[in-house]
């Protein structure tokens, strides 16, 4: 919790820095030329700190495990500063505004949502004897995948991961199990509704019908079916190889019993709060120069309140028996502040579209398959919500230039559904390709490691699992649908 205090202090410092910049801008406004559009003026090498941040996450746990374990927050802060300080020196007030904007409008709501889901789901305890056989494990993955679109990939992952780990605590080879859990529950399963994953919710806010994304059901079923079949084969192989079938269960067999079940009502409240923020418009508030909807602030307040209710109403013994600690959410908070700040130039360049340094990529996208792989490749390492919006806007601009968005989105859904499906599926599916592709990936990894499961490194995950199992599935999806 001390580290969370550090984050709060940094946030206050950022606010003070912003206020000072505003005063300076007001005093010298007549002498200050209008700033250029950042996305158009930023060079591609401004993304280097983001690349270094990713390399630190990938290599330091292997090369300097002791140092990383105790100082990963400082490493994250170093790379954030290495981008932020030169950025502010070069672009002044407008750079400060962008940094404060991504913290206030993106990072803080992101952490509040994760914290509330983590806190509430951590209060649900499934007691009893569940033995992780291939059939039982596959069934749990099916259940998690099925509910992810309705309670969000983060909610489903946080709800299912602890029972999944406990059911397999007697197994020797567990790494691949957690990886497939990330593939299915934390990513692919969230592709059917705007509640499932942030990019689809963003599309909903821009006029895509709530149930339109059910059109991706065949794509999701194909990928899920291939991954589940592969998982069952792998699990069956290791189950026999370990001799797990003949290994007696530890302790007496206990009947299944659910404790902390009132937290399911609180989970429904979280889903309702998120949905509410997307369907009502109560005006805007200007906070530190950042315009956010009143409904967004209300949502954040509700999420904090719901998490607090869970903490107060759930017995301490339930969380202790659930091996609940704050370490995973603290790790995510400290690492993702560095990720959000260092990836800012990448996002701004992407938003500039054909006028930015990544114009070569935007201009090369003209077929559904291109949209699927371009949106997917970037979503593997960047925030998939702005990536979705970039290619969503590219499609609208390509097919309906000059047409109001409210009209062009309706035409896109009806006349060019393959393009919208490609952007939607690519943004969600490819989030499984790396630990940072989607928020719950990192949290699941942290919870698994805390429970004693050795997880692959950043590159090990990508090379040993994502490239081997995910990319062939996505190739099949491309051949069948795009």
Image: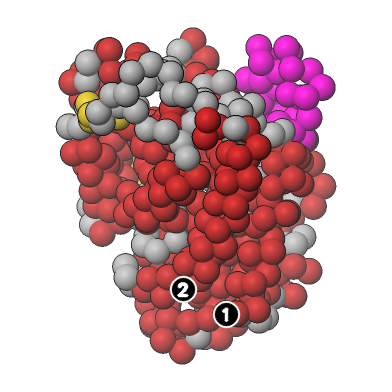
Residue 455, compared with residue 1, is above or below; it is: below
Q: Quadrant of residue 473?
A: bottom right
Picture coordinates of residue 480, whole percent (x, y): 60, 80
Q: Earlier in the sequence, mark 2 or mark 1?
A: 2
Residue at coordinates 60% horizontally, 72% vertically from top-left?
Answer: 477
Q: Which quadrant of the figure contains the C terminus?
A: bottom right
Query: Is 427 on the left-hand or right-hand side of 324?
Result: right
Picture coordinates of residue 228, whole percent (x, y): 52, 56
- Secondary structure state at the residue bearing disc 2: helix
Camera-nearest residue between 324 and 376: 324
Specify few, some or many for label 2: CA neighbours under 10 Å numbering under 14, 14-19, or 20 or more: few
Q: Which residue is mark 2?
A: 218
Residue 416, compared with residue 157, is above or below; it is: below
Residue at coordinates 32% horizontally, 49% vertically from top-left?
Answer: 151
Q: Which residue is mark 1?
A: 481
Residue at coordinates 74% horizontally, 67% vertically from top-left?
Answer: 361
Specify few, some or many for label 1: CA neighbours under 10 Å numbering under 14, 14-19, or 20 or more: few
Dominant SS in magenta: helix
């Amino acid at each position: 919790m001390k580290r969370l205090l550090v984050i709060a202090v940094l946030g206050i410092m950022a606010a003070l820095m912003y206020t000072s910049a505003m005063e300076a801008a007001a005093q010298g406004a007549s002498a200050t030329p209008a700033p250029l559009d950042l996305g158009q003026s930023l060079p591609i090498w401004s993304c280097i700190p983001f690349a270094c941040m990713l390399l630190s996450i990938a290599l330091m746990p292997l090369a300097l495990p002791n140092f990383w374990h105790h100082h990963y927050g400082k490493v994250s802060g170093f790379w954030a500063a290495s981008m932020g300080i030169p950025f502010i020196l070069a672009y002044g007030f407008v750079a400060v505004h962008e940094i404060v904007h991504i913290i206030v409008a993106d990072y803080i709501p992101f952490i509040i949502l994760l914290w509330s889901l983590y806190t509430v789901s951590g209060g649900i305890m499934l007691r009893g004897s569940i033995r992780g056989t291939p059939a039982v494990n596959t069934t749990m993955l099916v259940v998690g995948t099925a509910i992810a679109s309705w309670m969000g990939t983060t909610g489903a992952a946080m709800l299912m991961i602890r029972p999944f780990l406990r059911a397999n605590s007697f197994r020797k080879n567990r790494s691949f199990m957690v990886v497939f859990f990330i593939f299915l529950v934390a990513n692919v399963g969230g592709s059917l509704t705007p509640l499932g994953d942030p990019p689809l919710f963003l599309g909903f806010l821009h006029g895509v019908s709530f149930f339109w994304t059910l059109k991706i059901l065949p794509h999701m079923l194909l990928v899920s079916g291939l991954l589940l079949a592969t998982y069952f084969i792998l699990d069956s192989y290791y189950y026999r190889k370990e001799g797990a079938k003949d290994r007696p269960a530890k302790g007496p067999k206990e009947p299944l019993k659910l404790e902390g079940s009132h937290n399911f009502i609180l989970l429904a409240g979280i889903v309702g709060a998120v949905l509410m923020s997307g369907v009502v418009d109560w005006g805007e508030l200007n906070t530190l120069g950042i315009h956010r909807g009143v409904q967004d602030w209300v949502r954040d307040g509700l999420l904090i309140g719901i998490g607090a209710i869970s903490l107060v109403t759930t017995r301490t013994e339930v969380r202790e028996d659930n091996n609940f600690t704050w370490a995973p959410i603290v790790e995510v908070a400290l690492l993702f502040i560095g990720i959000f700040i260092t990836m800012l130039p990448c996002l701004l360049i992407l938003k500039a579209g054909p006028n930015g340094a990544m114009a070569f990529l935007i201009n090369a996208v003209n077929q559904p398959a291109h949209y699927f792989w371009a949106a997917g490749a970037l979503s593997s390492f960047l925030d998939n919500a702005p990536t979705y919006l970039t290619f969503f806007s590219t499609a609208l601009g390509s097919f309906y230039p000059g047409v109001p968005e409210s009209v062009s989105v309706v035409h896109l859904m009806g006349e060019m559904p393959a393009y919208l499906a490609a952007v939607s599926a690519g943004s969600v599916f490819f989030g499984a390709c790396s630990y940072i592709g989607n928020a719950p990936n990192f949290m699941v990894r942290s919870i698994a490691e805390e429970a004693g499961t050795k997880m692959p490194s950043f590159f090990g995950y990508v090379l040993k699992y994502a490239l081997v199992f995910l990319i062939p599935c996505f190739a099949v999806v491309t051949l069948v649908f795009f």
